[in-house]
Amino acid sequence: ATTLRDAGAAGRVFSRHRLRRALVAAQAALSISLPVGAGLCIRSLNAAATMTPGFQAEGVVVGWLDLFSAGYTADQGRDFYARALDRLRAIPGVESVLRGRRIPLGFMGGSFSDVTVEGHTITDDDPQGVALNSVGPDYAATMRIPIVRGRDLSPADTSRQPPVALITETMARIYWKDRDAVGGRFMFGGPRPDQEPQWITVAGVVKDIKQRSLNERPSPMVMIPILQFYASNAVVHVRTAAGLDVMTGQLQRAMRELDPQVPFYNVSRLADHTKAATFQQKMA
């Protein structure tokens, strides 16, 4: 009995030593992995912070409008937007004004569509749809997006004119390859035997812009004139040299004078939205 007790005690001591060594090894491994992981996260954050989104957010103030809740019809809405933009352009310090459906890097989700490109043979390497946004005239100029070929959207691109669009460099490279994309045609979806093809002509090609995150790969995108496709809600983009505090009051006052029943909300700097695009890296 004495021998068995001594052997059992020795075994327990040996087991405790093994457990202690295992815990020390685990602690050392965790201590090494945490700084390494933290360093990688910090490097990812720094890389995201130095990436350029492809547009100049500084100097742009954005605000959201919704005419549906105010009971506007499509014709009334078009008239209201025309008067609203003219009124905002008259504010001292405003350089340019436009409206769009979405802002890039704005956590608003996105719209995507399949496309059929004239003269392009579909392959397995084609992307699963292209990003879509509706924007106003002079969008590239206001957002300071370089135009590679062709022209910017203009006030003449209305619903009475043939449909046109801006596309990004990546879309031109994928679907037009060695051809000039300007003047090329595409349609959303595919052709239907019971309908005439609704072709859209490429008016211009612009540099790629980030859409959902700063570290995303360049992806194809289409920007169609908002004057050709009515939408009741919109984001007003105002490029100005004035600060947000000064501009917010003037913008809201101008919108109230037009119609106090129309909600105009979330007036903010576009640059603040692009900074929020590093949210995941900051959390990590």
Image (spheres, helix red, strand yellow):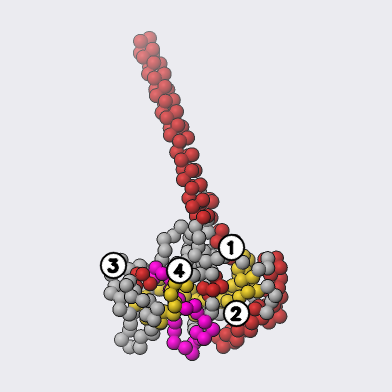
- Identify which amino acid the numbered label 1 is placed on: Ala
> Which residue has dot 2 on it?
67
Gap in angstroms between the C-alphas marked 3 and 4: 25 Å
Q: Do the residues labelled 3 and 1 touch (CB within 8 Å)?
A: no
Residue interval drawn in magenta: 151-171
Q: Position of residue 186 (x, y in %)?
A: 37, 79
User: Label 1 crowding class (10 Å Cα cut-off): few <14, some 14-19, many 20+?
Assistant: some
Say if residue 189 shows up in the picture.
no
Q: Residue 124 carries which label?
A: 3
- Identify which amino acid the numbered label 2 is placed on: Leu
Mark 4 lies on a secondary structure that is loop
Image quarter of residue 257: bottom right
Q: Do the residues labelled 3 and 4 touch (CB within 8 Å)?
A: no
> Which residue has dot 4 on it?
207
Q: Position of residue 243 (x, y in %)?
A: 68, 65
Gap in angstroms between the C-alphas marked 2 and 4: 32 Å
User: Along the polypeptide, which appears first: circle 1 or circle 4?
Assistant: 4
Outermost residue on the bottom side: it is 160
